[in-house]
């Protein structure tokens, strides 16, 4: 069961690593399909767990700032993939 209090305490680096692992699993599909798949995954997770998608995006923005402040290599890799592979 998801502990909602823990959503505010997840470690940024490890969370970005998990995001990158999820991204890696979809790399063989067309970019448009990947983007929609991530959106569907996010929507289904929020719906199934009764989470407010807007609040979750705010939490993601905060985690992104923390990862950026700590110069996360994983975040750089994730961003580079999104910029160069999905936008090609």
Image: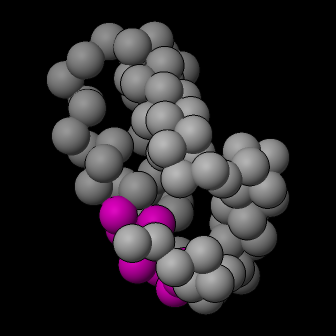
Establish if 18 lies above or below 3: above
Number of numbered discs present? 0
Choose between 3 and 13: the one closer to the eye: 3
Q: Main secondary structure of the magenta part?
A: helix
Q: Is residue 13 left or right of residue 71?
A: left
**Residue 18 placement: quadrant:** bottom left
Q: Is residue 68 visible?
A: no
Q: Give the range drawn in magenta.
A: 10-18
**Residue for point 46% across, 12% down:** 32
**Residue for point 49% across, 35% down:** 44
Is 70 inside the magenta-drawn segment? no
**Residue 29 placement: quadrant:** top left
Establish if 7 lies above or below 11: above
Establish if 26 lies above or below 51: above
Q: Is residue 67 left or right of residue 41?
A: right
**Residue for point 41% across, 56% down:** 19
Q: In which quarter of the image is the N terminus?
A: bottom left
**Residue 63 placement: quadrant:** bottom right
Is 15 inside the magenta-drawn segment? yes
**Residue for point 40% across, 78% down:** 14
């Amino acid at each position: 069961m998801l502990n909602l209090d823990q959503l505010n305490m997840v470690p940024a680096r490890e969370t970005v690593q998990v995001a990158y692992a999820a991204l890696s699993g979809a790399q063989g599909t067309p970019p448009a399909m990947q983007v929609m798949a991530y959106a569907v995954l996010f929507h289904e997770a929020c719906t199934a767990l009764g989470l407010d998608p807007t609040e979750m995006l705010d939490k993601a923005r905060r985690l992104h700032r923390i990862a950026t402040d700590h110069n996360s290599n994983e975040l750089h890799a994730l961003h580079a993939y999104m910029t160069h592979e999905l936008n090609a």
